[in-house]
Amino acid sequence: MAVILEEAKGLNKELIKWVKEVAEITEPDEILICDGSDEEFNYLINILLKEGSLIKLNEEKYPGCYLYRSAPFDVARTEEATYICTKKKEEAGPNNNWMEPNEAKSKLFKLLKGCMKGRKMFVVPYILGPVSSKYSQIGVEITDSPYVVINLRFLTRMGKIALEKINETNNFVKGIHSMGNLDPKNKYICHFPEEMLIISINSNYGGNSLLSKKCHSLRLASFQARKEKWMAEHMLVIGLENPEGEIIYITAAFPSASGKTNLATLSPSGKYSNWKVWLISDDIAWMHVGNDGRLYAINPEYGFFGVVVGINEKVTPNLMKTISKNTIFTNVALTKDLTPWWEGLGEYPEELLDWQGKPWKKGKPAAHPNSRFTTYLKQYPYISPYFEDPNGVPVSVILFGGRRSKTIPLVFETFSWEHGVLAGAMIRVETTAAAEGEVGRLRNDPMAMLPFCGYNMGDYFAHWLEMGERIKHKPRIFYVNWFRKNEKGKFIWPGFNENIRVLKWIWDRIKGKVGAEKTPIGYIPRKEDFDFEGLNLKDEDINELFKIDKNEWIKEFMEAKKFFEKFGNRFPKKLWDIFYEILENLK
C-alpha cells in the first residue's frame, strides 16, 4: 500500500529531495509513495468511486472493469498546449511549439503554486522497458490524480520494483502533473529534454497526463536517442509466423486511425488461419543496433492505452477477449445492465447513457470518438513469448502507412533505406479525433512522429540516415495504405484480417520468393504474385489499388517540398537528392 513520505524507508535521497521541493510549491495535504500493490489499487479505485467519476461495470460480463468519465472539454491530446523547452529555439524546430525554459518554469510554477491544496500527492515510480533490460529507463511521475496512478499501473512496471531500481542510480526522468482546476486556457504540457523533466497542468486526459506515455517514451526519449545513437519511435512491433514456424519481426509507424491497433492485433482467418501474429508492442518501439549489426526493438510499455471505437468480435476478436476483464474504459457509453458500449459493436441498444452520462440521442455519438481502454498487454491471447526479452527482437521489416483515400497504392517497397526514410518523411494522413482540431483534412505526419518528436525534425531525418549507416543488416522498408477508395467513395480493399495477404507478399519479397514491378515511386506487386483469391475484387478494383497516377504523385511531391523547406538547411541534402531524382522520373 502507498506509504506517507515520512514513513517511507530506504528511499533514494535525490528522490526525497525532489519530492519535497515539488511539495513546497504545490502544497498537498499528504504525500503518498506508490508501491503498485493490489491493496493500493483498490484504495485508489474507491477514491474515484466515491467522487463519482468512476463506475464499476457489470462484474459477470466485465470482471474487474470500470468506466471513467472525463471533463467533456478534456478528451484528447492538446497539441497547441504542448511545448518543447530547449535553450535554443532551433533545437525544438518548426515541428514543435517552443518556450524558453526559464520563461516556461516561471509560468508553470505560478500555476502549480498551491494547486494540490486539499488533495493528496502521489509519487509514482515506474520502469519503461523489461525490468532486466539495459535499454530500460526509470521515471517518476508526481501527480494529484488517482486516475493517472491507476492507468500507470497498467501501462508501466510501477511501484516497489521501480523504487528498487532508482536506488541503483540517481538518474530518472522527472514528471510533475496536476489536474489544477482543468482550466483549458492555462493548459500546458511542457518538456525540458535537456533536463529530462516534464511538467503538465490543467488536463487529466491520458495523452496529456500519463507522462510515461508520449511525453517520456517518445518526446524525451527521441531527444535522448539521437544523442545516444538509438531510436525511439511511434511504432507497433509484431512477430509474423508462417505455417512452418518461421518468424520475422515487423515494426510499423501509422498515424492515429490508420489501422495501427488492427495490425498489431491482427487475427489471421480463413485460408491464413495457420499463420500467427504475435504482439510485442501496439504503440511504441525503442530500437538499438545489436552486436550482430541488426536492429533490435523493445516495447517500453507494459499495457495498452488504445482507442476503443471500432473494436468488435468480428474484426478484432483477440482484443475483445483482452478488454473483457481488468480494464479501465474512458468516455464510452453505458448500457442499462452496466456494460460498456461504443460505436462499432453493432446495433445501438434501446437504452443507453452517452459518454457524458446523459440519455443518448439518436444521430449523436454514444461513445466519444477518442474513447479509450487501458489494460495489461500480458492479457492479450497472442502476446509474444519475447515480450519481456531484455535484448528485444530483430527487426526485418519497417512499414510506413496512413489513411489515404487516393494516390497511395495498397503496398510498395522502397528502393533503399534512404528512399524509405524519404517515404516515411512524406507521410500525409487524413486527420482523426485522437488530437483536437478539424477531422478529415490532410496533414503531414512524418514517421507518425510529428506530434511526438522532441527536437527539430530536420535533425530527426538526419538521425534516421545516420542509423542506416550504423545498421549492417538493414530492415527493408515498405509503405502500405489500407484505405484507398474507388470513384463511388467506397473502400476497395477489405482491410482488417485480410491485411495478412499484404504481409504475406512482404514476407515473400524479403525471402526472395517473388519479383515486383518497378515504378518511379517503388516496387509494387505483380498481380500473379499477390493472393486475391476469394476477395471478389474486380480487375478494375485491383488496377485501382496499385495504380500510380503520375500527376497525383507530382502534386504529392510538391506538397512534401513545401513541408520539407520549413526545416531549411537542417533537412538532409541526401534526401533532397533522392526527392529530385524520383520527381524527375515521375515527370
Image (cartoon, rainbow, N blue to C red):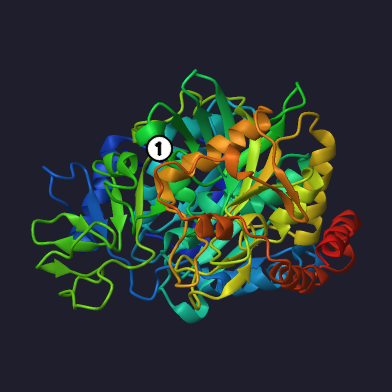
Q: Is residue 119 left or right of residue 458?
A: left
Q: Which amino acid does label 1 sit on?
A: Leu
- Give the residue drawn at x 18%, y 59%: 50
Quadrant, the C terminus: bottom right
Which residue is under mark 1? 377
Q: In which quarter of the image is residue 53?
A: bottom left
* Residue nearer the viewer, 380 or 529: 529
In the displayed image of the protein, which residue is found farthest to the bottom? 185
Against 417, residue 47 (above or below) is below
Against 15, residue 163 (above or below) is above
* Residue nearer the viewer, 68 or 314: 314
- Give the residue drawn at x 73%, y 71%: 551
Q: In which quarter of the image is residue 445?
A: bottom right
In the displayed image of the protein, which residue is found farthest to the front? 539
**Residue 349 in the image, given as x and y percentages of width and height:** 13, 64
Quadrant, the N terminus: top left
Circle 1 sits in a helix, a strand or a loop, which is it? helix
- Give the residue drawn at x 62%, y 60%: 408
**Residue 529 in the image, given as x and y percentages of width and height:** 59, 38
- Give the residue drawn at x 43%, y 67%: 490
For the question of whether residue 328 can be seen, the reply is yes
Disc 1 crowd rating (10 Å Cα; few below 14, some 14-19, many 20+) is: many
For the question of whether residue 126 can be seen, the reply is no
**Residue 370 in the image, given as x and y percentages of width and height:** 39, 64
Against 47, residue 407 (above or below) is below
